[in-house]
Image: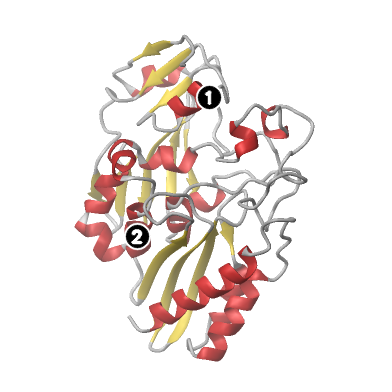
């Protein structure tokens, strides 16, 4: 049962920002995560600020420098259906295509997908965990088969977004508006690790709004991809996923960006794998070294050690696939 709250429908961005000034209101874009959290009592709010009537927050359009602008309220389905994104930003198109179910892709927005709350059953359940203001992470000694193997200091969630690692690999930037100024936040810097603050998911302040995501023009020779492994192929969050954005110079990798999903509380940059393939041809030896480097330092919990070989195999498979494109 949903709690009682007021719904405000501002018609300008300035009005929407003003409605968020007290820090207690919540933003409504597509609502696929917000309404679930309110229904389940994950948090409460006296006011929901709907952005649906604010102009300029949806749509996909080219930028002056050859990149692409995606409005914050653009639905995941619109991203899947964009020929421009499919042709030039394969990792994002593939990631969007495996988000949730068709119904949720039709309703959910790109900014909402970046900012969604964790899917940890302790956080979503009747547990006063650390992320909700309690004193401990129940997953550490509890049922943790779906939890993180990297970056789990204090809180052991995995970030649930598929589009976040893809956008981070592609070098995307979020444009953020606040009451006094606007700023740009790289997607790879948007999320907050538990070691910095176990009660925040993003660097956004309560009175800030993502207005658009900007993708740079792909460099010549860039190939990108995203793939995730999930328990149910029809609809599920990633047990393990990898986003690749590799720039080739001939047969050799000139630059590499590798981000993992289902691995950590934030989209996890696999810098070891990047180093292993940069400047190298993607032969069997290099790929094996990259896959091993990607899982170096993993710290699985009692029930999720299977993720280590799963990531190793997934990265091997995806690097082999991308070298033949």
Q: Earlier in the sequence, mark 1 or mark 2?
A: 1
Instruction: Between label 1 and label 2, give the one nearer the viewer.
Output: 1
Q: Is residue 282 left or right of residue 152?
A: left
Quarter location, residue 211:
top left
Residue position for label 2: 94
- On residue 40, which mark appears? 1
On the image, the x and y values in percent for residue 23 come to 56, 18
Quarter location, residue 182:
top left
- What SS does tag 1 mark? helix
Quarter location, residue 108:
top left
Locate the C terminus and report the quarter of the image it occupies.
Answer: bottom left
Q: Is residue 93 placed above or below 292 in the rendered structure?
A: above
Q: Is residue 283 placed above or below 290 in the rendered structure?
A: below
Q: Residue at x 48, y 75 (%)?
A: 255
Q: Residue at x 52, y 87 (%)?
A: 280
Q: Residue at x 53, y 83 (%)?
A: 287
């Amino acid at each position: 049962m949903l709690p009682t709250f007021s719904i405000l429908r501002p018609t300008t961005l300035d009005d929407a920002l003003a409605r968020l000034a007290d820090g207690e209101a919540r933003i409504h874009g597509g609502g696929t995560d917000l309404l679930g959290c309110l229904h389940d009592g994950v948090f409460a709010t006296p006011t929901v600020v709907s952005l649906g009537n604010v102009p300029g927050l949806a749509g996909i359009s080219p930028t002056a420098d050859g990149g692409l602008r995606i409005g914050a309220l653009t639905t995941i389905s619109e991203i899947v259906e964009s020929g421009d994104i499919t042709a030039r930003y394969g990792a994002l198109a593939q990631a969007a295509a495996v988000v949730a179910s068709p119904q949720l892709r039709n309703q959910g927005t790109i900014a909402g997908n970046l900012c969604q709350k964790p899917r940890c059953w302790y956080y979503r359940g009747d547990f006063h965990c650390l992320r909700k203001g309690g004193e401990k992470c129940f997953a550490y000694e509890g049922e943790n088969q779906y939890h993180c193997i990297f970056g789990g200091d204090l809180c052991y969630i995995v970030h649930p977004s598929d589009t976040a690692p893809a956008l981070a690999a592609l070098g995307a930037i979020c444009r953020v508006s606040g009451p006094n100024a606007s700023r740009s936040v790289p997607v790879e810097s948007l999320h907050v690790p538990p070691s910095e603050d176990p009660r925040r998911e993003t660097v956004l302040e309560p009175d800030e709004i993502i207005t658009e995501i900007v993708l740079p023009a792909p460099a010549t020779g860039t190939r990108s991809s995203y793939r995730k492994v999930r328990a149910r192929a029809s609809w599920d969050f990633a047990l393990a996923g990898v986003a690749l954005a590799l720039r080739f110079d001939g047969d050799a990798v000139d630059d590499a960006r590798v981000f993992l999903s289902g691995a950590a509380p934030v989209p996890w940059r696999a810098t070891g794998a990047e180093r292993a393939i940069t400047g190298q041809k993607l032969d069997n030896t290099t790929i094996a070294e990259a896959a091993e480097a990607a899982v170096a330092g993993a710290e699985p919990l009692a029930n999720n050690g299977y993720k280590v070989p799963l990531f190793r195999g997934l990265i091997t498979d995806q690097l082999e696939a991308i070298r033949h494109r």
